[in-house]
Amino acid sequence: MIQFVLLISRQGKVRLTKWYSPYSQKERTKVIRELSGVILTRGPKLCNFVEWRGYKVVYKRYASLYFCMCIDQDDNELEILEIIHHFVEILDRYFGSVCELDLIFNFHKAYYILDELLIAGELQESSKKTVARLIAAQDSLVETAKEQASSISNIIAQATKFERS
Amino acid sequence: MNPFSSGTRLRDMIRAIRACKTAAEERAVVRKECAAIRAAINENDQDYRHRNLAKLMFIHMLGYPTHFGQMECLKLIASPGFPEKRIGYLGLMLLLDERQEVLMLVTNSLKQDLNHSNQYIVGLALCALGNICSAEMARDLAPEVERLLQFRDPNIRKKAALCSIRIIKKVPDLAENFINPAASLLKEKHHGVLITGVQLCTDLCKVSSEALEYFRKKCTDGLVKTLRDIANSPYAPEYDIAGITDPFLHIRLLRLLRVLGQGDADASDSMNDILAQVATKTESNKNAGNAILYECVETIMSIEDNGGLRVLAINILGRFLSNRDNNIRYVALNMLTKAMTVEAQAVQRHRATILECVKDSDASIRKRALELVYLLVNETNVKPLTKELIDYLEVSDQDFKGDLTAKICSIVERFSPEKIWYIDQMLKVLSEAGNFVKDDVWHALIVVISNASDLHGYTVRALYRALQTSTEQETLVRVAVWCIGEYGDMLVNNVGMLDIEDPITVTESDAVDAVEVAIKRHTSDLTTKSMALIALLKLSSRFPSCSERIREIIVQNKGSLVLELQQRSIEFNSILQKHQNIRSALVERMPVLDEATFSGRRAGSLPAAASTSTGTPHKLPNGIAKPAAAPIADLLDLSSDDAPAPSSSGADFLQDLLGVDLSPASAPAGTSQPPKAGTDVLLDLLSIGTSPPAQSSSSMSDILSSSQDNKAPLANLNGLTSLSSLSPTATSPMMDLLDGFGPSPQKHEENGPTYPSVVAYESSSLRMTFNFSKQPGNPQTTLIQATFTNLSPNAYNDFLFQAAVPKFLQLHLDPASSNTLPASGNGSITQNLKVTNSQHGKKSLVMRIRIAYKMNNKDVLEEGQVNNFPRDL
C-alpha cells in the first residue's frame, strides 16, 4: 500500500501531498523535511529507493520535480516507478507537456487526477485514456454549471434592469 | 457581496505568494489572505466559498494552519452542485484526517452522495471515503459500498472495490460481507475493475482466513486463466507499457496467486505452468518487464516448492544482480535476502557479487547488501568474508561505518573458529573503527581475553603495537589500557611468545608511557581515564622501578574536576605511599572473568544478541570449552549474593570490572551486605568522605576480599575497627582515613549488623551525615542519627531540619540537640530520626530533606534528596 505521495521541487518546496495513512500536521511537516533532506541530496546515478523508518520511499525526478511515494517493506518498488511514470504521463497529456508551473497554479487539478489514479493507497486504473476521459467529463460538468450560473445571473440582471426602466 | 473576500482570485494569490522574496513577506501575504477568508466564513459568504477553500488548500500545502476552514468543506459537500462538491471533497481529504471529530459530521452527506443519481458525485464520495474514512464511518457506510460493487458503471465498481479495502482494514469483522461480491469482480473484463478486484481479494485474504480458503478453492483456476490471457494478449494500445499489456494487472494477479499458493500444494501446482511462462517469456530490457519478473520470482519463492521453478527464479535474480541499473540490483539484493530462508545454497553462489555490492557507492544498495552478507556468513566462509569486510572498513564512508562495524563484530562473535582469530579480528576493528564499537562488544572482548590465558602475552603485545599507530579510537585505547594494566609484565618480558609474532622490545617505562598518553589525552573520556588510572596502579606493582613515576602521574589527577578521578587518585596515592605491604595483593591480576555470567547478562539486557552469545555453559560464543570459572569470580558480580541481578549489563560490567561507578547519583549497590570481616572495615573507611564514592570504594573492598580469600595477606585486617563509629566527626581528608588501620581491635561482629554511615547531604556550606543502627528484633525500624556540620565561616541560627518520606515509610523526628550551628565545623548539631520501612527487604529507604537556617540574619534554604541509604535498611 502507498502510505503517501509527495511532490517536492528541487528547492524543497512542496507541490502536492496526499496522505493515505493518518499523519498529524506536525508529523507531516517532519516527514517532508526529513525526506527532502535525504532525497534531494542523492546523486543522479543512484537507485531510486530510500529506506526510511521501516518503509521504502520510491522517488523519481522529472525536470525540477521529485515524485515520491512511500510504500510498505514488501511492496514492489519497480512497479511503483511505473505508477509514478503513469501519473506523470497522464498529467502530461492533460496539461500538454506539463511543467512545474502548471502544477502550482492548477494544483487542484493535479489532485483530481491523482484521485482518479489512486484510492486508499492502491492503484485504481491502468488506462491513461480512461483517466483522461473521466477527468474531462467532470471538468465539463463544472463548466456547464458555471455557464448556467452566469446565464442565470444574466437573466436576473436583465430582469432587474427591465424592472427599473 | 463581501468587499474583502472578493479581493483576489486564486491565481493572483498564488502569484503574490510566489513573488515574496522572504519568508516574512510570505507570512504577511498568507496572514492577509487568511484574515479575508475568515471574514468571509463569518459572513457565511456563499459565492466565493469554493474559491476560498481552494486558497486554503494552497495555504495548507505551504504548511500554515487552516483548521478554521474545515467546516467550509462540510458546507460545500452539503451543497447540491457538482463543482461545489468536487472542491469540498478535495478540501475534506486535504485538510482533515480520520482522527478529527469533525469528520463524523460528514457521514450523512456521504451517505446521500453514495446514493446520488449523478455517478460522478457517487465517485467523489467513494474516493473521499476510501481515502480518509474512520472505523465508525466504515461501519456506517459499508452497506452502501457493498451495494456499489455491483453498480452498472465500471468506474464506480472499481472505486467501490478500493473503498472496500479501506473498510475491511478499518473493521476486519466486515470482511465476510465482501467475499462474494469481490469474487464476482474477478470475472470482469474491465481492467480497472479487475485490478481493484484482485487487490480487494488480496487484502481480504490478509484479514480473513475464511476468505483465503474461499478464493483458493473457487478462484485459483480462474486467476491462472486471467493471467494467461493477459500474458498472451495481442498488442493493446490502451494498456501497453513497453510492449507488455498492463503490467499493473500482471503484478496484482501474481501477488494474489502468491497468497493463494502459500502453504497449499494443490493451488501451487495449478499455477506452476503460468509462473514458468511468465518467468521465461517476459522481456527484461525495460523496467515494466523487470517489475513483473521481480513479482514472479517472489511468488515462486513463496509458494510450495517445485524444483525447477526455484532454479529459474534464482537465475533471474543472478541476472538482476549483474545488471547495470542500480534499481534492478537493489531489488535483486532485496529478494535474495528473502530467498535465504528457502534457497540458502543457491544464494551462496552469488556471494562474490553480493560482496561487491557492499562496496557500492549507493547507500541504499550497500545497506541491503550488508544485510544479505550478514545472513550469508557461516562457519566455512567466515574468514574470507570477514577479511573482505574489514578491508573495506578502512575505506568506507563515515556514515556507513557504524552499520558495518556492528555487523562485523556480530559476525566475528558468532562464527569465530578460534580465540586467536577472534582477538585478531576484533583488534583490527578496534584500530579501524573503535569509535563505532558498542560497549557490550568490547566488554565481551575483554572477557574473552581474560579467559584465553595462553594468549595474554600475545594480545597485550598486539594491542600495544596497535596503540602506537592509532590513538584516536577510544575503545581500542580502553582495551589496550586494561590489558597493559593486567598483563604489563608479559608485554615487557615477551612472555608466551607465539611463533607468528615478531619480537618487540618494550621497556617498563614504554608501557607506562602508553598508559600516560591515554590518561593525558584531552579527548579521553571519564571511562578511559579511570581505566588508565587503575592500570597505572596495577603497573606500579608490576614495575617497581617505575613506581615513583607512576605516583607522580597519579598525583596529577588529584586536582581533577571529575570527582571520580580525584577521589581515585587520592586513594591510589595513599596506597602507593603508605600501604606498600598490601599493595601487591591489592592489585593482583583480575581473576578470570566468567563468560557465562557475562553472556547471560548480555542476553538479558539485549534480546537481539541472545542468539549470538547465549548457549550452554560449555558451548561459549567462540565454541571453545570454557575453563572452570574461578571460585572468586562471583566477587565480580557485586549483586549475586543478595540482590536480584541488575539488568543493565553495560554499566554493571564496567563497574564489576573496574570498580568504577560512572553514575555517581545511583544508589550504592555494593554496600548492602552486612559486614562479615575486615574487608568491610575498609568499606566503611572509604565511604566516609562523600556519598557517591561509597559504591566505588565498596568494589574496592571486594577486590581486597578477593585477594584475601586467595592469599590471605590481609589477615591483619580481620577485626580492625569499624570507623563507622568515628564517622560523625570524621571531617578530615581521605588520606588520613586510610591511616585508620590502627590496631584498635573491636569485635563489632557481635553487635549484629552494622551499617556504614553515609554523608547524606553535602553542599558548599553544610554537611549532613547519617549513622544507622537497628533495634534488635525489629528489622523494619532504623534509628538514624543525623549530624550536621557547618562548612562555612559563619555561624548558623534558627537551624531547622525537615524530612519527608514516601508512603511505605514512617518517619519520626526527635528534637535537635541545638538550633545553633557554630562556624567552620567547630561543633555540630545532632538529631535522631526513626524510620520504619513497611516494605523492608523490598524497597530501600529514600528521603527528601529541607534545611533552613539564618546566616548573617539572612534566610537560607537548602533542599535535597537522600537516596544513598544502605540497601538493607
Image (cartoon, coloured by chain):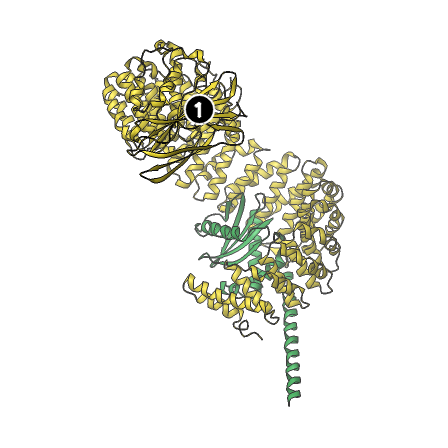
Chain colours: A green, B yellow
**Left or right relative to A142: residue B424:** left
Tell me which corner region of the image, top left, top right, bottom left or bottom right, holds residue B823. top left
- Name the chain letter of the residue that bears numbered label 1: B
Depth check, front residue: B319 or B442? B442
Depth check, front residue: B54 or B558? B558
Rendering coords of residue B638 (x, y %)? 45, 21
Rendering coords of residue B324 (x, y %)? 48, 46
Q: Residues within 10 Å of mark 1 (few under 14, many from 20)?
A: some
Rendering coords of residue A114 (x, y %)? 59, 58
Depth check, front residue: B451 or B337? B451
Q: In this view, does B178 lie above or below B517?
A: below
- Residue B320 visible in this rendered orientation of the protein: yes
Depth check, front residue: B818 or B745? B818
Q: Is residue B20 above or below residue B703?
A: below
Q: Is mark 1 on a helix, strand or loop?
A: strand
The amino acid on which the numbered mark 1 sits, given as a three-letter code, is Ile
At x 42%, y 62%, the residue is B24
- Residue B491 visible in this rendered orientation of the protein: no
**Left or right relative to B166: residue A62:** left
At x 76%, y 44%, the residue is B218
In the rendered image, the residue lying farthest to the bottom is: A165
- Label count reads 1
Rendering coords of residue A111 (x, y %)? 58, 60
**Left or right relative to B619: residue B430:** left
Q: Mark 1 points at which residue?
A: B784
Q: In which quarter of the image is the N terminus of chain B?
A: bottom right
